[in-house]
Image (cartoon, rainbow, N blue to C red):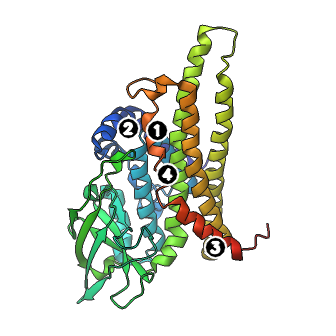
Amino acid sequence: MTHSTLEFEELYKQVRKIAQEVASIYAPDVDNKARFPIETITALQKVQALSAPVPKEYGGAGCNMRQLGQICAALSAACGSSGMVLAMHYIQVACIARHHQNQQFFLSYLKEIVEKQHVLASITSEVGTSGDTRSSICALERENGRFNLNKAATTGSYCAHSDAILVTCRRNNQASNNDQLMVLVQKSDFALTQTTTWDTLGMRGTCSPGFNLESQGLENQVLPVDFADIASETMVPYSHILWASLWWGIANDAVQKAAAYVRTLARKTPGNVPPIANRLAEVSVQLQSMKHNWQMLATEFDEINAQPDTVSQLHDMRWALKMNNLKIGASDQAPQIVHKTLQIVGIQGYKNDGTYSLGRHYRDVLSASLMISNERVAGKSATLLLVSKDDN
């Protein structure tokens, strides 16, 4: 293994330990109270896991997509909310790391993420846009080297617990709704007024109510790249691949619980395979397929980024279809897998307080098809399929 691989393996080992010894312990309370998983995030900060996507030249671990997916999967197996917070944070860090255009403010901020292990959130939703992240109503106002930016967000995942928020907006008051920029607003820059509640079925620890955001800061906090490019090259692939990895992590843990239950039955009748073991064999096929899909596309993304024509490939319609298919496939498969494990475990999985409890797993993965609605994603794929010609 290379030195870089050894560094990742050590970080991965530490995250897995945190998953087992911290996240899994606090997950029931986080879920029950719909509270931020502060214990897990604090533990991740201590091992510098929050700066994993930051390139090595700025002090980070420089983890690639596949490695970040492994980290998110390991954590989400113990606590889906913690895994989702970490994945969303990684997406925002990647937006800065990949689109800073060598501007000094963002280069310094990357080093600050490493040093202080900042938690980054985002506000891409907005009241009045019907969930379309590629459309904004609010606009950036600039004057004398400073900006003002106010936004009414339908959701703001863990924004109240973040050190900074990346916010999408129109370029100015004259710009069209899809002529967007992304702005980094720091804790000292913004005020949040909560407008809705967060009492949800699952992913309760992500703390994602609606907010009215009021912010101001220096103009150099505006990322120097159109959000359309940030979305295509970073936000979409990081979101779909990392989310797929964490949904797989939750599903994988459910299968492991089911396997442990079947082994318990087998020990009661030595020499005989419990009939229900066939169901376990069947669900393992679907789990393997789900894993291979996200890991294959994570590897492909890393290979694309090692090539000189990265940008053109990430804007290609065929790549967009792969991302859409991954999102829809993973978000459909995860609930199916958890449902099948519940049929294997039975009432022991249905109970919330038992060794084989699957209630939180089930509720958390049901969010998958709603996070960027599968209907919306399928609609975009349908349009692409009408004009795309796959030569492979």
The amino acid type, in three-letter code, at marker 3 is: Thr
The amino acid type, in three-letter code, at marker 4 is: Ala
Distance between the Cα atoms at labels 2 and 3? 41 Å
Q: Which residue is mark 4?
A: 368
Q: Would you say residue 71 is visible in this rendering?
A: no
Give left or right: position of 240 versus 198.
right
Find residue 361 and name its label: 1
Give the mark nearer the N terminus: 1 vs 2.
Answer: 2
Distance between the Cα atoms at labels 1 and 2? 14 Å
Distance between the Cα atoms at labels 4 and 2? 20 Å
Give the image quarter of residue 385. bottom right
The amino acid type, in three-letter code, at marker 2 is: Ala
Q: Is the Cβ of the residue at disc 1 closer than 8 Å to that at disc 4?
A: no
Distance between the Cα atoms at labels 1 and 4? 12 Å
Give the mark nearer the N terminus: 3 vs 1.
Answer: 1
Q: Which residue is mark 2?
A: 23
Give left or right: position of 331 versus 16.
right
Give the mark nearer the N terminus: 1 vs 4.
Answer: 1
Q: Position of residue 105 (x, y in %)?
A: 34, 75
